[in-house]
Amino acid sequence: MEPIAEREEEAYENIEPERRKVYNNKDITQENGRLLHMRLNVAIDGPVSAGKSSVSDAVARRLGILHLDTGAMYRALGLATLRAGIEPGDEAKVVDLCRKLKITVRHEADGQHTMVEGEDVTGMIRTPEVSMAASTVSRYAEVRKEMVRIQQQLAAETDMLVDGRDICTTVLPNATAKIFLTAAQEERARRRFLEMKEKGQEEPFETVLEELKKRDKQDMNRAVEPLRQAPDAELVDSTNLTFEETVETILRIVEAKRHG
Ligand code: DC
């Protein structure tokens, strides 16, 4: 016997789009009193190195849905900017480049692959230079507009967990569950330091902390869509939580919202 979810999905696909009912961005299409499909979108925002990527990966896996790391898209543009010899602070040139470039993501068994003009740049976007360039190019309204458009399109297609800085506020204002994941600045710097060390990118702790403070400041103070906790997002402070505890806390929030 086929799993119910698949049969419901199939039944849903057979309903003409004009007969599908949407309320608050949630699909409430019913047949014989049975809810056929309810899009599951989980939105997670938070500052640098709050553990968003790895926690989001684990939560998405446990929920059996895809994980979209939106930071990787801004990083891809940051990388492309540096490669083109454009100063990330040059808004007009960055916006022009963003309009010309095709930035896409592909989900494979080992996770998200981020592509620029078809080239897989996944392994090149985690350096400190690209991090800073990504933070700078993400300040521009036109860049954000384009990124948000692509992200909303992807999230509308399938059940998905999306993480970033403006997901709860702008990308998925009607998400099933919204979480603001953070941790104390020193703790985030410590995690980033260890993560970089593991990758062979040795930097003194003080440098890592300074870079994190700079990026925090830029992400939280930019004019367009600065990082902030959405009023209806649940705060998860992971300073004193283990990785597994953080994952469990978020899963509990999602389940409560989903069935509550
Ligand atoms: O999450 P991350 O560190 O990979 O993100 C890199 C930069 O991209 C971050 O400094 C701010 C920007 N960003 C953003 O402005 N909006 C998002 N939704 C995701 C990332």
Image: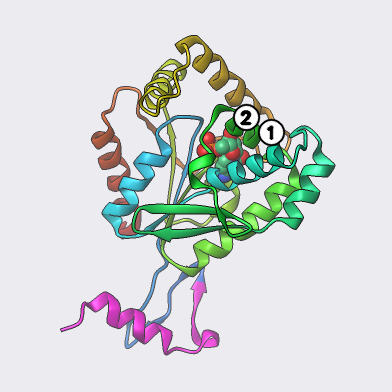
Q: Is residue 259 left or right of residue 79?
A: left
For the point 50% across and 87% down, the residue is: 19
The tag on residue 132 is: 2
The tag on residue 87 is: none
Please identify the quadrant where the C terminus is shown. bottom left
The type of residue carrying mark 2 is Met
Residue 153 sits above or below residue 34 on the image:
above
Question: Would residue 235 be seen by someone viewing this image from the given angle?
Answer: no
The answer to which of 84 and 126 lies nearer the viewer is 84
Location of ligand 1 given as a quarter of the image: top right
The answer to which of 106 and 251 lies nearer the viewer is 106
Residue 96 sits above or below residue 158 on the image:
above
Q: Which residues are magenta?
A: 1-22
Dot 2 lies on which element? helix
Q: Answer yes or no: disc 2 within 8 Å of ligand 1.
A: yes
Please identify the quadrant where the N terminus is shown. bottom left
Report which residue position mark 1 lands on.
136
Residue 7 picture location, percent across and down: 28, 83
For the point 62% across and 23% down, the residue is: 217
What is the C-alpha distance between the residues marked 2 and 1?
6 Å
Residue 147 picture location, percent across and down: 64, 53
Residue 44 picture location, percent across and down: 45, 44
For the point 49% across and 82% down, the residue is: 20
Q: Residues at badges 2 and 1 in contact (C-beta under 8 Å)?
A: yes
